[in-house]
Image (cartoon, rainbow, N blue to C red):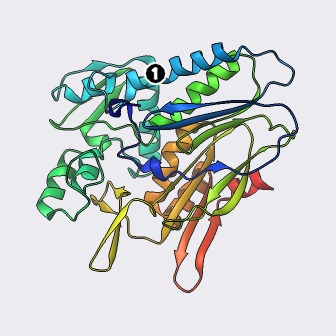
Amino acid sequence: MSVPQRFSRRSFLILSTAALAACQLEEEVLRLSGSTMGTTYNVVAVPAGKSIDKPALESAIHTALAQVNTEMSNWDAGSEISRFNAAPAGQTVTLSPALAEVMRNADLVHQASEGRFDVTVGPLIDLWGFGSGVQGPHIPADSDISDALARSGQSRVLELAGSDLRKTVDGAEVYLSAIGKGHGVDRVADVLRGFGLENFMVEIGGDLYAAGHNGNGTPWQIGIESPVAGDRALHSIANVANLGMATSGDYRNFFEEDGTRYSHIIDPATGRPILHRTVSATVLTENAMLADAWATAMLVLGRARGLEIAEAQGLAVAFIDQVPGEGFVTTVSSRYSALQA
């Protein structure tokens, strides 16, 4: 797929490591896959005796994903969000229902995560060389970080009232790479439900939604990748049914300088990469859009504060920390533990 349709090039989500664990399905399944948002999508559905028009279903999925790109792709200059980004400060833009819903949820997660989920952090990601610019990853000057911080800060530089959005600072932009793929998953899930399917798994670039059961009649088994650069080993498996799931990690997109590793996960509060020991955060919640956003927020927060917020919000979260002398240590919220019991 062409670069203008990408969501994941910038992105926290290229490190979302949730993947299907190997399992042998006993019941006949329907499989569809393709390219979207600079990555791939995969659909596995259990028809349960229903007659499904596969070409019609595939066409409907492509139409839904194309619409998401038209609304939310930062790599399409004609998309709805790109047009907003090009607008001057003070100009009110009325959003489509889908984009307005995404922005409302982005605001909710932003507030609940103490600002650690932030759709305006793009200038900082670009500044550190992890975005779409031509310069590779590097440590920027403090003055440049300050300038980029002045153009970011979701609650400060954006005002959302219903479906009306305006920026209060020139140069502020909205990047949806940490919530858009999850929303795309949910849109495809809606398509599958419209075809009468009740048991399915939809995955886009590691973000997913699993409904009902797999071909064995049990919850979908989803693998969480071991957080080791250059490795694709399986760390653990989660049982998922009627939930969205996303994992964010800091171990594949980073650079090292003077013995310090700088990841692409930028803390909006400091304008700098995270330096704590949490290397992966997996979230299970009601839909893929929220799982997508919360996985990013939890990784930025880190296990200590993230776990406190997860308990307060009733979120199912699994953190993996890299602890000297102990290796990888997993800590889960009470909701996550209950879901896997």
Classify mark 1: helix, strand or loop.
helix
Q: Position of residue 205 (x, y in %)?
A: 52, 42
Whether residue 157 sits left or right of residue 297 in the image: it is left
The image position of residue 120, as x and y in percent, is 30, 42
Answer yes or no: is residue 314 visible.
Answer: no
Between residue 160 and residue 35, name the one nearer to us: 35
Quarter of the image where one finds residue 94? top left
Q: Quadrant of residue 209?
A: top right
Residue 273 vs 241, above or below: the answer is below
Q: Is residue 111 left or right of residue 42?
A: left
Residue drawn at x 80%, y 43% as measured from the top left: 219
Q: Residue at x 80, y 24 (%)?
A: 47
- Circle 1 packing at 10 Å, graded few (<14), some (14-19), many (20+), is some
Up-down relation of residue 8 to residue 61 (above or below): below
Q: Quadrant of the C terminus?
A: bottom right
Residue 311 appears at what percent x and percent y? 61, 56
Quarter of the view holding residue 162: top left
Q: How many marks?
A: 1
On screen, residue 26 above or below 47: below
Q: Which residue is mark 1?
A: 66
Q: Residue at x 63, y 67 (%)?
A: 331
Q: Quadrant of the N terminus?
A: top left
On the image, the x and y values in percent for residue 144 come to 14, 57
Q: 108 or 218, which lies in front?
A: 218
